[in-house]
Amino acid sequence: MSEESQPALPAIVVRRGVVGLSRRLRLERTAASPTALELSVLGHLHRRGPVTPGDLAAAERVQPQSLTRTLTNLEARGLMLREPDPADGRRSLLAITDSGLVALRGEMQQRDSWLAAAMAAQLTSTEIELLRLAGELMERLADVTSA
């Protein structure tokens, strides 16, 4: 490895770890689980509250047309609803429903349980705390729009 690539080494290690853990967590999904994009949309609606479809697409970093089927599916299953935007009646706001919150929490609980058990079995308490802090930092990095 050249000296030029040394500053990128931490980024490479983090990316590999995130990709590997993400792949492993996906194995915890059941056949009836919402898709990854559906879970991401529900999670966004839960954390950030009602948003317009355009704002949601921007947050998910996809074209609005790419969300059409996902939003239709979530709405048809009662996991999300559309309401008129009180500030502009031409727009709609998307919000998670109680059923959507139950579905989201169920999915996350299953994965969180697996991860907590794996961490307890493989890591020291210091390593677990280090990962907790790293998780907070990764969330901050995920919100960066450009570097």
Image (cartoon, rainbow, N blue to C red):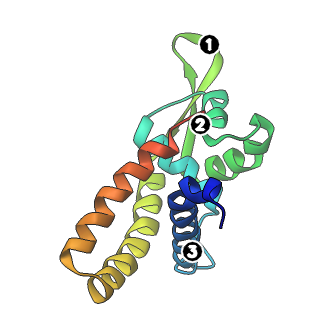
Q: Are marks 1 and 2 in contact (CB under 8 Å)?
A: no
The quadrant the C terminus occupies is top right
Mark 2: amino acid: Ala
Q: Earlier in the sequence, mark 1 or mark 3?
A: 3
Q: Nearer the viewer, mark 1 or mark 2?
A: 2
Q: How dense is the environment of label 1, judged by Cα within 10 Å: few (below 14), some, or many (20 and up)?
A: few
| x 48%, y 44%: residue | 141
The earlier-in-sequence mark between 3 and 2 is 3
Q: In whole angstroms, how far apart are the C-alphas of marks 1 and 2? A: 22 Å
Report the residue marked by disc 2: 59
**Element marked by disc 2:** helix
Residue 55 in the image: state x and y as whole percent.
61, 28
Residue assigned mark 3: 20
Spot occupied by residue 50 in the image (x, y as percentages of width and height): 49, 31
Pointer 1 residue: 89
Where is 112 relative to 15, above or below? below
Disc 3 residue type? Gly
Earlier in the chain: of badge 1 and badge 2, it is 2
In the rendered image, the quadrant that contains the N terminus is: bottom right
Asked if the residue at tag 2 contacts the one at tag 3, i.e. Cβ–Cβ closer than 8 Å, the answer is no
In the rendered image, which quarter is residue 65 located in? top right
